[in-house]
Image (spheres, rainbow, N blue to C red):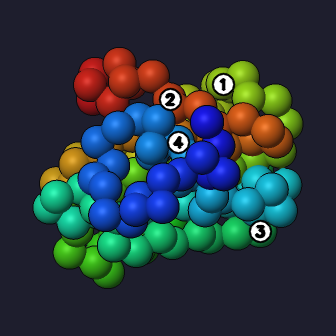
Amino acid sequence: MTFHDLPPHSRDLPLDDPTLRSDLVDLVVTLAAREGGCVALLLLDGDHLCTTPILVEEMGVPDASKVHQVLRTFLGQFDVPAVVVAIGRPGQGLFTDDDRACHQAVVEVCREQDITLLGTYLASDNHVREMPDHLRVAS
């Protein structure tokens, strides 16, 4: 599915479903944002409903230090119990070592701030893929 397939009442659905999360990431992280490099945060309430999407654009290809800084800056400003994070970059949808390092930075910041991480996604040219859970669970 893509964001075109989101149900009309998607704002009222919790983001517990990975397909729904992926579709919402596809909507929030535009192609232009992916081309310029970005980090998207979907701030969630206690029922895992998206309360606020945040998109930090034009950051070049995201690396772990940039992602760490963005997350610490924004997550420190909001009292949220859960989050979905997307790393946007140009290119193929295959995971790189830099993507995995960004995911690890996401895991570490969420753990430090006691925020539930529902998922980390890579949004590239025409792909939105969830980073493997074992990276999140291992940390």
Mark 1, residue position: 95
| CA separation in Å, label 3 and label 2 | 22 Å
- Tell me the crowding category of disc 3: few under 14, some 14 to 19, or many 20 or more residues within 10 angstroms, Cα based: some
Q: Amino acid at mark 3?
A: Glu
Give the residue at the far front of this rendering. 8
Verify CB contact (< 8 Å) between mark 2 and mark 1.
Answer: yes
Verify CB contact (< 8 Å) between mark 1 and mark 4.
Answer: no
Verify CB contact (< 8 Å) between mark 3 and mark 4.
Answer: no
As helix, strand or loop, the secondary structure at mark 2 comes to loop
Q: Position of residue 135 (x, y in %)?
A: 38, 24
Task: Give the number of the disc on residue 131.
Answer: 2
Task: Give the number of the disc on residue 22.
Answer: 4
As helix, strand or loop, the secondary structure at mark 1 comes to loop
Viewer-nearest of discs 1 and 4: 4
As helix, strand or loop, the secondary structure at mark 4 comes to helix
As helix, strand or loop, the secondary structure at mark 3 comes to loop
Task: Give the number of the disc on residue 58.
Answer: 3
Q: Nearer the viewer, residue 16 or 118?
A: 16
Q: Amino acid at mark 4?
A: Ser
- In the rendered structure, the answer to whether residue 74 lies left or right of residue 48 reads right
- In the rendered structure, the answer to whether residue 65 lies left or right of residue 81 reads right
* First-in-chain label (4 vs 2): 4
